[in-house]
Each structure stands twice: as structure tokens, then as C-alpha cells.
Amino acid sequence: MSHDRIGARLLRAWRGRALWRRLCHRHQLDAGAYALLMIEDDAELNELALRHIDDLVTDRKAAGVVVLTDRPEVAEAARRHDAHILGVVELSAGQVEDLLSLAELYNFTVRLLVVSWTRPFGADLRAAVGVHGVTVEDVLCLCMLTIRGWSSEAAVDG
């Protein structure tokens, strides 16, 4: 990676830090709430993520969830759910990249959960779906939301 690209990523991470601090202040993310960054165009994945917010809140003993997204359809769907959603914040694509750059630089908080097949670290989690009965829901709950108490049909049967 060239020095210019490294500098650009560091600048994005710096902007991501500033954005994260504003989000923490406005939405009490340091007082028990979690941020769910939803950046995929995958309607099934997004719907499952919204449906499992109650599970996440229960597992983490959280105050609730703030949905962050650059997808208008995700924002609209999140506003229709009442499952412990404290707020919906529509971000620009640049702001999403800034937050992801910060998350890729270092694990700066446990309060940011990214609902994505490939971000922040580039691994394609889709490859796990179908292996030994693993479902999209399993990958979401175990890898993206890290719900510690999650048990699925595949885990029980496999």
C-alpha cells in the first residue's frame, strides 16, 4: 500500500473518530446503547438483523440500538420496527467509509456492530452459509451481532 493510500485511510479513520464521538454524544452510545451499522443491499440480511435486535439487546443487556445506514430502504424499514430501536441515523457513503476505516484500523469499541458480508475486514462470510447447515441467520447472529446465547437448528442437529 502506498504512503498516499495509507495517509488517506488514516484521514478517513480520523474523520470516523470524530463522527463516532458525535454519535456517542447524541445517542448515549457510551451509556449502554449499541450502534448497528447496516451497509448491505441484501434485503434478507437486513430484515434478519432488524428482527434480532431484541435478542441482541437481551444478550448484551443493552439500553437499545441506534441504526446507522447509508441505505434509504434500511432506514425506512428500521423506522417501522419498534424493537428497542432508539434512533435511525442516515449517513452518507463517505461517513460510512470513515467509520469503517476507523474500525479497520483498530477495535475502538464493542458498541459498533457491522452488518456486512465483507466489512470491516474483507472476509466473505457468505462462504459459511450452507456449510454443515449454517444459515444466513446463524452467520448474522454469531459473526456480525455476536449474540452469545444464539443456538440454531444447525448447532443442535450438527
Image: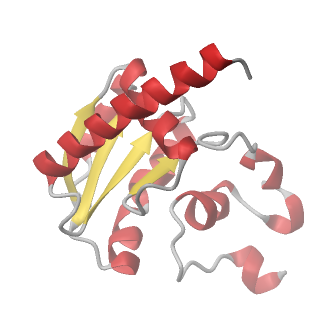
User: Can you give x and y, in whole percent of width and height, for residue 154 in the image?
Assistant: 76, 74
Residue 14: image quadrant is top left
Q: Is residue 28 left or right of residue 154?
A: left
User: Can you give x and y, in whole percent of width and height, for residue 91 in the image?
Assistant: 31, 27
* Residue 108 or residue 58, whichever sits in front: 108
Q: Residue furthest left?
A: 26
User: Can you give x and y, in whole percent of width and height, for residue 59 in the image?
Assistant: 40, 79
**What quarter of the picture does the N terminus occupy?**
top right
User: Can you give x and y, in whole percent of width and height, for residue 54 in the image?
Assistant: 34, 68
Residue that appears at 40% across and 72% down: 55
Q: Is residue 144 left or right of residue 12?
A: right
* Residue 142 or residue 119, whichever sits in front: 119
Residue that appears at 55% across and 43% down: 105
Q: Give above or below for 70 relative to 51.
A: above
Q: Residue furthest right?
A: 132
Q: Is residue 154 visible?
A: yes
Q: Residue furthest front?
A: 3
